[in-house]
């Protein structure tokens, strides 16, 4: 039986002593003077790097929540989500991000930067010690590949959130690095080199669940290459995973949010969490504060709510295909009759008024929401298990469990390949077939039913795309909508808009309509060329004068 990599660890020696020292570390140094590295210490260093995926360094209920590995804060900066919580005055830094008045002193930017740069430092500590560690019985090459994979991942997340970043490796003193040393393209090349090393040196499987393998590296290569529009290479690495026979779509879409499939065949790169007796350890605090407020989860904080625009995007036509033009026009799918056809994934992804929530009863806006600032309280269903499951913690923090967070799942690999086939105009019909694999899983899943179990809870209607009128332009629209629906509330939306180059026009259109249902968005504007990224934290600019250049517009 495979073991699960345990990432709940404390290595205080690896952490900076205070908030002002984000990058001021010496990652190439030994752990402490006079300490000789042995196999156990080496394992601890590697485990510490893996534990960085949880973003749990200090002040768990603040830094982790505002700088999470899940990137829910990026969804709030897109057209997919509202901040939620106890009103617009609750977690003001996140509200500022949602309304595009984020500035360099905002804690949101600092905490995301802090979590990622500390994570990179942990990887570099492990890498530098692996380079010096001599033990023929230790799997140094494999562990080096794991560390370079994680270092690449943390750099990539930093790049997508901040645009102008330093490259930090084991030879660079953090306090001497600059975010002007490399262009964005050069940073991507360095990230790609780390992932290529991982791909070349990792085994196809690992004894412990949670460790990355060759297929994880192939998937991450797709994630990078799609950013660079290297379509043929995306297809190559996607095929490595598809043809391996090791991965596939789970039968039931709803099982993606359950403990039984959290390490199942669809999960390619997953952050491991655990149920522990100590509620402050193990679980994913970055999403647990987002649990809905209700009798099912008493005291839930109710952050991270789906936007009306996202819910409306699930509308389908009489043929079971997405409504592209005018999908966001009234009637809004807020819960009056549910006679209009919708993609069934909407009720697997968010709570809608008068639709059952898992096995916990009827979800109603009036009873399951904390603030009138968010009248349509579409709480995310994907990051919390059924409240009746005994594997959920009973008490504060609400709904804590060992539910993992998946960064890459097999459905996204299929969609990456489809996008490369379509955008490269290589084989748009094969792209249609891949998209339809994802749609057919949704079609064949067991739909949400009424409380009595007699009928479906809404008019669910989803069908695969036909060959008729499948042009490149239509295929592109279909692929982009499919990513939004399939990956809703999983932290991808803003990054997709940015790489497609349509963020400004999409968000401005969204704001024009959305304030009619969410009044605090009235008058909010998105500045194209600035608000796609967060500002470089002012603390970094002040600490290293002349080394850092602020993002445009901040």
Image (cartoon, rainbow, N blue to C red):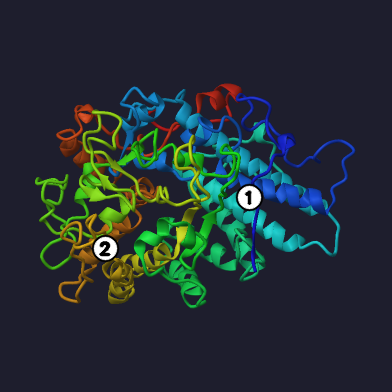
Q: Is residue 486 above or below residue 101?
A: below
Q: Is residue 373 above or below residue 417?
A: above
| Rendered-image quadrant of the C terminus | top left
Displayed quadrant of residue 439: bottom left
- Residue in the image at 34% along x and 53% along y: 359
Q: Is residue 77 visible?
A: no
Mark found first going from the N terminus, 1 or 2: 1
Label 1 or label 2, whichever lies nearer to me, is 2
SS state under label 2: loop
Q: Is residue 541 above or below residue 44?
A: above
Circle 2 residues within 10 Å: few <14, some 14–19, many ≥20: many
Q: Residue furthest front?
A: 452
Q: Which residue is mark 2?
A: 447
Q: Position of residue 180 (x, y in %)?
A: 54, 37
Is residue 58 found left or right of 188 in the rendered image? Answer: right
| Rendered-image quadrant of the N terminus | bottom right
- Residue in the image at 22% along x and 60% along y: 343
Q: Position of residue 85 (x, y in %)?
A: 35, 31
Observer-nearest of 101 and 491: 491
SS state under label 1: helix
Observer-nearest of 300 and 20: 300
Return the mark for residue 504: none
Observer-nearest of 413 and 90: 90
Return the mark for residue 50: 1
Q: Is residue 141 visible?
A: yes
Is residue 387 found left or right of 432 in the rendered image? Answer: right
């Amino acid at each position: 039986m495979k073991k699960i990599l345990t990432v709940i660890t404390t290595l205080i020696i690896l952490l900076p002593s205070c908030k002002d020292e984000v990058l001021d570390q010496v990652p190439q140094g030994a752990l402490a003077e006079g300490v000789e590295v042995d196999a156990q210490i080496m394992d601890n260093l590697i485990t510490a790097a893996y534990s960085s995926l949880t973003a749990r360094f200090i002040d768990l209920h603040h830094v982790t929540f505002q700088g999470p590995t899940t990137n829910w804060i990026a969804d709030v900066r897109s057209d997919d989500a509202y901040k939620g919580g106890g009103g617009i005055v609750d977690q003001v830094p996140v509200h500022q991000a949602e309304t595009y008045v984020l500035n360099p002193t905002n804690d949101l930017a600092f905490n995301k930067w802090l979590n990622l740069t500390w994570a990179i430092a942990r990887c570099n500590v492990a890498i530098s010690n692996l380079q010096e560690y001599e033990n023929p019985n230790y799997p140094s090459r494999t562990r080096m590949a794991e560390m370079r994979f994680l270092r690449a991942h943390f750099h990539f997340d930093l790049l997508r959130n901040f645009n102008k970043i330093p490259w930090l490796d084991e030879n660079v003193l953090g306090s001497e690095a600059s975010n002007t040393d490399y262009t964005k393209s050069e940073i991507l090349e360095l990230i790609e080199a780390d992932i290529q090393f991982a791909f070349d040196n990792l085994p196809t499987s690992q004894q412990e669940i949670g460790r990355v393998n060759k297929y994880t590296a192939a998937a991450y290569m797709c994630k990078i290459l799609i950013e660079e529009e290297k379509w043929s290479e995306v297809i190559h690495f996607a095929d490595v995973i598809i043809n391996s026979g090791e991965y596939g779509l789970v039968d039931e879409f709803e099982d993606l949010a359950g403990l039984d499939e959290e390490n199942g065949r669809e999960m390619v790169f997953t952050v491991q969490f655990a149920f522990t007796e100590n509620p402050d350890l193990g679980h994913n605090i970055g999403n647990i504060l987002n649990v809905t407020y209700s009798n099912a989860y008493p005291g839930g904080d109710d952050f991270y709510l789906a936007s009306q625009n996202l819910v409306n995007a699930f509308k389908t036509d009489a043929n079971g295909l997405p409504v592209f033009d005018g999908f966001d026009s009234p009637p809004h799918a807020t819960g009056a009759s549910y006679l209009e056809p919708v993609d069934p994934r909407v009720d697997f992804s968010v709570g809608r008024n008068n639709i059952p929530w898992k096995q916990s009863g009827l979800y109603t806006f009036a009873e399951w929401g904390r603030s009138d600032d968010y009248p349509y309280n579409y709480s995310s269903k994907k990051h919390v298990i059924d409240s009746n499951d005994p594997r959920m913690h009973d008490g504060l923090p609400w709904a804590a469990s060992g539910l993992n967070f998946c960064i890459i799942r097999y459905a996204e690999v299929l969609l990456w390949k489809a996008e490369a086939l379509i955008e490269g105009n290589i084989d748009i019909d094969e792209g249609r077939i891949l998209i339809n694999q994802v749609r057919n899983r949704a079609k064949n899943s067991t739909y949400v039913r009424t409380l009595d179990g007699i009928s479906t809870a809404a008019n669910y209607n989803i069908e695969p795309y036909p060959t008729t009128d499948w042009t490149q332009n239509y295929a592109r629209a279909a692929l982009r909508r499919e990513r939004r629906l399939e990956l809703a509330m999983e932290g991808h939306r803003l990054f997709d808009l940015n790489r497609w180059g349509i963020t400004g026009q999409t968000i401005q259109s969204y704001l024009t309509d959305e304030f009619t249902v969410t009044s605090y968005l009235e008058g909010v504007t998105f500045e194209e060329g600035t608000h796609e990224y967060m500002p470089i934290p002012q603390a970094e600019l002040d600490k290293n004068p002349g080394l850092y250049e602020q993002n445009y517009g901040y």
